[in-house]
Amino acid sequence: MTPGGPAPADVDDATAQRLATALRCITVTRDEADPDVVEFDRLATHLEQSYPLVHRHLELERFGHGRLYRWAGTDPGTAAILLAHQDVVPVDDEQGWTHPPFAGVVDDEFIWGRGAIDDKSRMTAILEAAEALLASGHRPRRTLYFAFGHDEEIFGRAGAARMAARLRELEVYADLLLDEGGVVTDGVADGATTPVATVMLGEKGWATVRLTTTDTGGHSSMPGRETAVGRIARAVARLQDHPMPLRLTPVIADMLARLRPTMSQPRRSALRLAPVASGVVTRMMAARPQTEALVRTTTAPTVIHGGVKANVLPQRAEALVNFRILPGDSVRGVLDHCRRVVNDPRVSVETVGACSEPSDITGPGPVFEVIAEITRALVPAAVVTTGIVPGATDSRYYDGLAATRCNFAPILVDAADLDRIHGTDERLSRANYARLIEFNRRILAHFTEAGG
């Protein structure tokens, strides 16, 4: 049974301050080889002091600064794996913030600081929920895991990858894997007349392709027909002008079917065509970057280098092009596409850095309906739909460990709030934090019983 009843309207000062204290720990990750041990240790101490019942009753295994908790159940099997991450991205423009980004300021409406949304609030909300259930005598019927990585913002190889490998060693298979990704947006989904709660069921892959060319160089007064810089510029332009094909995947078709009743005309009528005229629908979605990302492997030239001086012909030029890969495409397919489109043997094409294939896409399933029911209780006006994460999360390492994967938190945000994530003035309202804690409490309570 999923606990019902109204959600709390706000969090009290003590609860808000526990999150704020976590935000004051400057757990920025820039480089896999250089974590700030002192700040991660400060955060660990804060968690252990703030949630004593969790740390008394749950088993904790550490993977560097990663924290894998096991809440043992009374029966065999695993109910759920809940993910969050402790690290945050750096701050570029500290002077532009209303409050210093690591001051952890709490006012009457908001909790301010880097990590307030991405992603320390998820971690502390899970712990708040577990602490409250433990205090009430609850115990899981089947085992629950909490996995808090420490390097999600730099690919997660030392945290999530190792914890997922540990769960595979233990032959864990859960009903639910829950991580960051979707939220409830208001005024963001084009044409939607109500708030939209997008529960992501998987994520796109990603790859960065490096284009490189070399030349003999020389004096700029006697150039050939094309310099190395010109050749690379032409290759980049070809890739940008010839993106990978539009395609309506089953999860996006499901998303549109769930959204259609909430859409204003003429979109509502147009979406009726999706089952028989997917090309029309994908072309409509390709008109905006936010929706094009749902129906195409995207192409984003991001870096270009070449030359040393205005009057010297460059001997080398290179460019980096980032691709976010739609399910059904692959890293190999992206490379094949690049070589075919560039069509120049003088330009080498290779991946650089880490790559990730698109994740498995799980079906909605019964646990999805539990999450949808809880979401509608916490945000009654919202329509709940499915989707895919256009970026990358730690949960990609956990493929195959759960029957249903959901990337979602029921915080209600607008376009300006979304811009604050990895941007300036990141903050979470007290009301949203109350929803997030209650959401996790109800999910955990679904798998637990009092006096177990």
Image: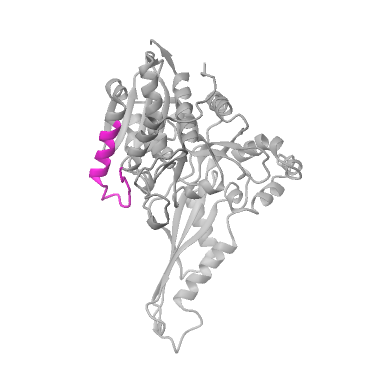
Q: In this view, does 346 lie to the left or right of 376?
A: left
Residue 253 shows in this picture: yes
Residue 92 shows in this picture: no
| Residue 43 among those drawn in magenta | yes
Q: In the picture, residue 187 is in which quadrant?
A: top right
Screen quadrant of the C terminus: top left
Q: Is residue 127 left or right of residue 391?
A: left
Q: Which residue is drawn at 32% across and 49% down?
A: 29
Q: With respect to residue 438, does 291 lie above or below?
A: below
Task: Give the percent coordinates (x, y) of residue 162.
Answer: 32, 37
Q: Which residue is drawn at 57% across and 49% down?
A: 293
Looking at this view, is 413 or 168 the one in front?
413
Q: With respect to residue 93, does 435 lie above or below?
A: above
User: How is the protein colored in the picture?
Assistant: one colour
Task: Give the percent coordinates (x, y) of residue 387.
Answer: 57, 39
- The residue most toward the front is 108
Task: Give the percent coordinates (x, y) of residue 239.
Answer: 54, 62
Looking at this view, is 85 or 251 the one in front?
85
Query: How many tags in the picture?
Result: 0
Range of magenta residues: 25-47
- The residue most toward the bottom is 221
- The residue most toward the top is 451
